[in-house]
Image (spheres, rainbow, N blue to C red):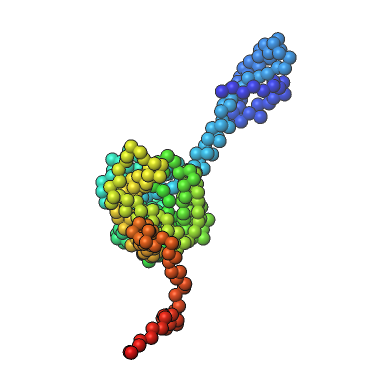
Amino acid sequence: MLSISPIQPTSSQSTAHSPLLRQLPLSRSHHLHHRRSRFCFHLLQLTRCRHPSALLIRALDAAQPYDYETRLSRRFSQSTALKIAIIGFGNFGQFLAKAFIRQGHTVLANSRSDHSSVAQSLGASFYADPHDLCEQHPDVILLSTAVIHTEQVLKALPIQRLRRNTLFVDVLSVKEFPKNIFLQYLPSHFDILCTHPMFGPESGKDGWTGLTFVFDKVRIGPQKSREARVENFLQIFEKEGCRMVEMSCAEHDKYAAGSQFITHTVGRVLEKLSLETTPINTKGYERLLDLVENTAKDSFDLYYGLFMYNKNSMEQLERLDWAFESLKKELFGHLHEVLRKQLFGKVEEGVQGPVLSKLPNNVAAFPPPKTNSVEINNN
């Protein structure tokens, strides 16, 4: 590239101002200075004929500032990039890996099944042996296993091969259970971040903008580098447009039992009915079909984990059962009134039925019935 600057008188320039000329022998430096002076003189004569403001073209790299900014940007990206090891490289693990890799992070994968070809197609490295994976010293260990296998997987992980300040993250649908497992099996020098992306491959297939991401910083070391690592991980979801919600694991499980568990339960109940589309589907029925499709795609282990490892789910299941029985009684009660009117409507027409007041607590408090006295004449 070329940059243009006004010509300065060359007679005032000295070879002492040029580091290149200072390094050359005296005769050679004078020769170069003489050639440069002659070139500038002829160029000066040419430019004065065409423009009143004489300009000199110097062969400089005009792209140098832009290259410098690019290098700075690349250096910043490298400093914030994470090496993330995903334990459980199934459907959801692969779903998350795409976003991690797209943002420039390095992904290592491990799973009971061989997903090496899928990992290679995504740009990740697959390790069948967890020992080999841990020896890569990832910054983050992310557990994306079924909740019922979490304890078993964590106990089998060779954490002694990891760096002592490694960050452990889970993305399970329940939060108190993995939090307690982490605190039980991980030494205090490991960091713990419990998270739950409130979406999956189906609901997040068109992007994560506006979708909820819940997190709880359970145990993070005081060093600035460890705090920055947590923020770098959370920024992955911020950059994707997620709605970031920080709350305790206990709060999460309370809310999730009343929303996620109920949603999956209703979806699986409707699945048992084998609902099918019809030529006259309503919008509401279409939404029910979508609910069945979304919940049926998840494994039963996931649904079982929502029930087994969230102490609030049993209460919600009982409330759902009570609500169904209450609705049945209300329906049958109205049906009884309709049938009674059909059967006895004409007979009871014009006859005012008894009006029951609130029943007393004690049956003995009922007043004695009013009857007409009948005299018996023995005569």
Q: Do we see residue 56 in this rendering?
A: yes
| Percent coordinates x, y for residue 66 in the rendering | 56, 31
Q: Do we see residue 107 in this rendering?
A: no
| Percent coordinates x, y for residue 205 in the rendering | 40, 41
In the picture provided, is 5 more to the left or to the right than 244? Answer: right
| Percent coordinates x, y for residue 128 in the rendering | 27, 49
Which image quarter: residue 253?
bottom left
In the picture provided, is 10 more to the left or to the right than 161? Answer: right
Q: Is residue 100 above or below residue 304?
A: above
Q: Residue at x 42, y 58 (%)?
A: 258
| Viewer-nearest residue: 249 or 158 | 249
State the residue lying farthest toward the top.
49
State the residue lying farthest toward the bottom.
379
Which quadrant is the N terminus positioned in?
Answer: top right
Which image quarter: residue 179?
bottom left
Count of labels shown? 0
Q: Residue at x 72, y 24 (%)?
A: 12
State the residue lying farthest toward the right.
52
Q: Is residue 71 above or below residue 91?
A: above
Q: Is residue 355 above or below residue 95?
A: below
| Viewer-nearest residue: 316 or 132 | 316
Q: Residue at x 35, y 88 (%)?
A: 377
